[in-house]
Amino acid sequence: MAIALPIIAWDNRLSDATPAASSTATGYNVLNLRDFRPYTWWKPSAMPATVTVDCVSAKAADCCAVYGHDLGSKGATLEVRGSTDNFSASDVLVATVTPANDKPLLLLFTSASYRYWRLKVTGAAAPSLAIAALGARFTLPVKLPYGFDPVARAVRGQSNRSADGHPLGRVVTFEEWSATLTLQKVDMAWLRSDLLPLWKSHLRGKPFIFSWDSGDHADEIYLVQAGDKLSMPHSMPGRADVSFDISGVALA
């Protein structure tokens, strides 16, 4: 079993400019795709359907994370396409996936740069998508150490007892997944040039998608937010042990 390096998906070409949908069902605005909210959706009113964005200049992407979808249930295919001329003569299929289920997915591909990016869905029935992050992945430099628990959960809700203390049951609101990401002996230069700028610009204040192993556990993907503290104590010359907390909803 080969564990892959952890990946954070946050960068999004759909946020470079206002994306345009080929069609949209009533109440399913295409802007919902980029808000990182799992309860707002885009759904086309006709198939096949596309979402296209003009990034003004060529921008890179090497992954597409989709959190909240029914592509599997609808038997739909998702395509990532790029173009240099707004899909006139240039229309390049960069990556494609036909999910077998509705679990979160992370589509990884060789980095490419285009001014125009497009998501295309094909199939007989129109699917719904909550979050789509098409951009450059942020790969952590080391694997998570033993002790990391990818499936832990804590019940969040209200417990009820009788007046004399007997258990009456619990109203379960959701199950929370939380973990401490520990990166051991990472290069201090990487911390300053890569992690700290991303922490300040995005991770400390905005949701992101986290994949702890895109290889053997490709569908164990979480929509998370970071905790309040980023710790980076030196562990040896030029190296540090990094840790910060993340939390989200547990997998079904």
Image: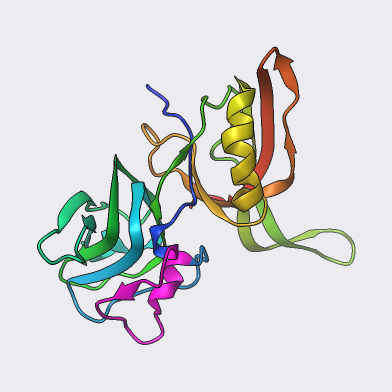
Report the span colored magenta: 15-34
Residue 27, given in percent of the width and then of the height, sits at 41, 85
- Residue 29 is covered by the magenta coloring: yes
Most common secondary structure along the magenta stretch: loop
Above or below, 20 relative to 228: below
Above or below, 226 relative to 33: above
The residue at 46%/52% (across/down) is 11
Q: Is residue 248 left or right of residue 42?
A: right
- One can see residue 152 in this view: yes
The residue at 24%/73% (across/down) is 126
The residue at 62%/49% (across/down) is 203
Residue 162, given in percent of the width and then of the height, sits at 83, 65
Residue 149, given in percent of the width and then of the height, sits at 58, 34
Q: Could you say which is closer to the camera, residue 193 or residue 39?
A: 193
Q: Quadrant of residue 205?
A: bottom right
The residue at 68%/32% (across/down) is 243
The outermost residue toward the top is 237
Q: How many marks?
A: 0
Q: Could you say which is closer to the camera, residue 113 or residue 146?
A: 113
- One can see residue 225 in this view: no
- Residue 124 is covered by the magenta coloring: no
Q: Could you say which is closer to the camera, residue 5 or residue 188?
A: 188
Q: Is residue 5 left or right of residue 198?
A: left
The outermost residue toward the bottom is 26
Q: Is residue 157 left or right of residue 207?
A: right
Residue 167, given in percent of the width and then of the height, sits at 77, 58
Q: Quadrant of residue 24?
A: bottom left
Q: Could you say which is closer to the camera, residue 167 or residue 46?
A: 46
